[in-house]
């Protein structure tokens, strides 16, 4: 089959690789009909995530038709159309029982990215996301082996096009969880840092949940303009306004917003010192976005972090967070938990995630898709690939 494989920083290729086979009784083999490139794939593409090996197949946002099932699979059958959560969960461990699927303690044979691990279990395995997360081949491919076939695959009816439901695999539940963690209610004010696909899905969900004021911060004007047109956000371009959190404080009677959402993560731009420190590996993450979140949030408010962080940040102002009495919530998305309600919102027309797609390409051209999305060229917001 054909698949997108990793060969080093900014070197991904579509190659012919062996077809996947059923390894466990509860495996499913899926024929992929649509797959997308995620901002998280860009961390891998840029060589920022360790334990990625030559030839690893990437991709964790994918859907398709069940091609084959192991003898223990009862949830789906050959021919079913399903989306696949990017998180691989067993459905019955301590964490799965709490619906904290991304913390599943049985699926990941890697160690996770935690530094001070002690004897704790790693988080759930993820598709196509390095050997820290299990080294599971990803779905930017014609076929993919899906472990935990009774837990992950989620059936979608035939009346919705692939692109309307594809983002149920990751970015839509991620934006939704970010808003739930931010406890957005009718009338809330919220600042979203990062107008990439995750920030845009968060804006869509915040709007749906009745937020009154949504401040959207980025430096790609085309992304800010899209958010303003579709989700009625207030745009703040940090190339023009050097201090976005000051601007937010000024516009909220000097208090700050009820909640901030950091949809940027550890590769945040804007601090020259941190860019140098992270390049030299003296610092693991850039703290630029998280510092603005802390500064922009009112006393007693919430900072919700869907953006991925790694290791340590020197400039993390824990004292400011304490002084303001902030609550922090963060982490990988418990995708499975939100699927039924989010599908309903898509069916009702409350959410139209496909609106953000700008690039529809063939899987064969996936390397070009990575390049365009990485450089934010051609006003790229989201790339969908079809095998
Ligand atoms: N928690 C999860 O389960 C989960 C799931 C999917 C993605 N993610 C993470 O969410 C983050 C965003 O993903 P994406 O697909 O939207 O990626 P993306 O790279 O397309 O978007 C990131 C946006 O942040 C902007 N940005 C950079 N520095 C900034 C700053 N200092 N202030 C404000 N904006 C800034 C960029 O210009 C870009 O538009 C990534 O870290 C990704 O790994 C997490
Ligand atoms: Zn992702
Ligand atoms: Zn589990």
Image (tube, rainbow, N blue to C red):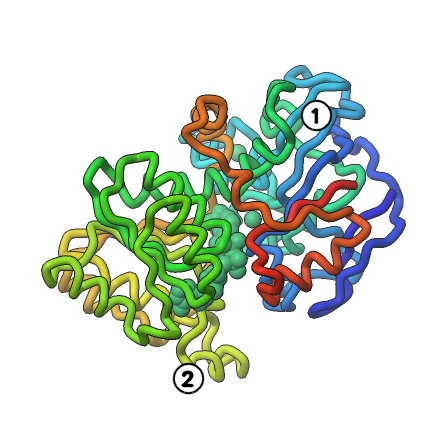
| Other-residue count near label 1 (Cα within 10 Å), few / some / many at <14 / 14–19 / ≥20 | some
Q: Position of residue 42 (x, y in %)?
A: 60, 60
> In the shown orientation, is residue 4 left or right of residue 319?
right
Residue 213, compared with residue 253, is above or below; it is above
Front residue of this view, candidates 235 and 187: 235
Front residue of this view, candidates 62 and 323: 62
Classify the position of the N terminus by image quarter.
Answer: top right
Q: CA distance from mark 1 to mark 2?
A: 49 Å
Front residue of this view, candidates 213 and 305: 213
Question: Please, which residue is most extreme toward the left here?
Answer: 253
> In the shown orientation, is residue 145 left or right of residue 105?
right
> In the shown orientation, is residue 227 left or right of residue 248?
right
Quadrant of the rendered image containing residue 10: bottom right
Asked which secondary structure carries label 1, the reply is loop
Residue 88, compared with residue 153, is above or below; it is below
- Give the numbered dot on residue 341: none
Question: Would residue 311 be seen by someone viewing this image from the given angle?
Answer: no
Q: Position of residue 130 (x, y in %)?
A: 65, 55
| Other-residue count near label 2 (Cα within 10 Å), few / some / many at <14 / 14–19 / ≥20 | few
Classify the position of the C terminus by image quarter.
Answer: top right
- Give the numbered dot on residue 26: 1
Q: Earlier in the sequence, mark 1 or mark 2?
A: 1
Point 58% across, 50% down: residue: 382
Q: Position of residue 268 (x, y in %)?
A: 45, 68
Quadrant of the rendered image containing residue 11: bottom right
Q: Which residue is mark 2?
A: 273
């Amino acid at each position: 089959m054909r698949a997108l494989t990793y060969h080093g920083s900014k070197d991904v290729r579509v190659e012919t690789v062996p077809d996947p086979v059923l390894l466990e009784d509860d495996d499913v083999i899926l024929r992929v009909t649509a797959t997308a490139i995620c901002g998280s794939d860009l961390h891998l593409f840029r060589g920022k995530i360790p334990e990625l090996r030559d030839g690893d197949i990437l991709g964790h946002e994918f859907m398709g038709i069940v091609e084959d099932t192991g003898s223990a699979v009862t949830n789906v059958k050959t021919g079913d159309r399903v989306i696949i959560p990017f998180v691989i969960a067993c459905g019955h461990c301590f964490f799965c029982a709490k619906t904290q699927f991304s913390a599943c303690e049985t699926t990941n044979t890697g160690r996770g990215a935690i530094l001070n691990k002690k004897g704790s279990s790693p988080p759930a395995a993820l598709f196509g996301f390095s050997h820290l997360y299990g080294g599971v081949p990803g779905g930017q491919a014609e076929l993919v082996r899906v472990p935990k076939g009774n837990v992950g695959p989620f059936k979608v009816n035939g009346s919705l096009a692939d692109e309307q439901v594809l983002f149920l695999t990751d970015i839509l539940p991620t934006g939704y969880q970010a808003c739930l963690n931010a406890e957005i209610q009718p009338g809330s004010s919220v600042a979203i840092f990062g107008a990439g696909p995750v920030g845009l899905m968060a804006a869509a969900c915040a709007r749906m949940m009745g937020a009154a004021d949504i401040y959207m911060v980025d430096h790609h004007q085309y992304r800010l303009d899209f958010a303003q047109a579709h989700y009625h956000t207030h745009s703040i371009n940090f190339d023009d306004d050097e201090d976005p959190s000051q601007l937010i404080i000024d516009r909220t009677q000097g208090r700050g917003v009820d909640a901030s959402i950091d949809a940027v993560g550890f590769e945040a731009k804007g601090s020259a010192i941190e860019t140098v420190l992270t390049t030299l590996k003296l610092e693991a993450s850039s703290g630029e976005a998280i510092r603005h979140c802390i500064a922009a949030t009112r006393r007693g408010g919430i900072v919700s972090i869907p953006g991925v962080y790694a290791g340590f940040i020197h400039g993390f102002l824990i004292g400011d967070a304490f002084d303001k009495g902030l609550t922090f919530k963060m982490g990988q998305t418990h995708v499975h938990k939100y699927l039924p309600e989010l599908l309903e919102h898509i069916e009702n027309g409350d959410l139209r995630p496909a609106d953000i797609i700008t690039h529809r390409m063939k899987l064969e051209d996936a390397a070009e898709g990575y390049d365009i999305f990485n450089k934010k060229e051609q006003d790229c917001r989201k790339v969908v690939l079809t095998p």
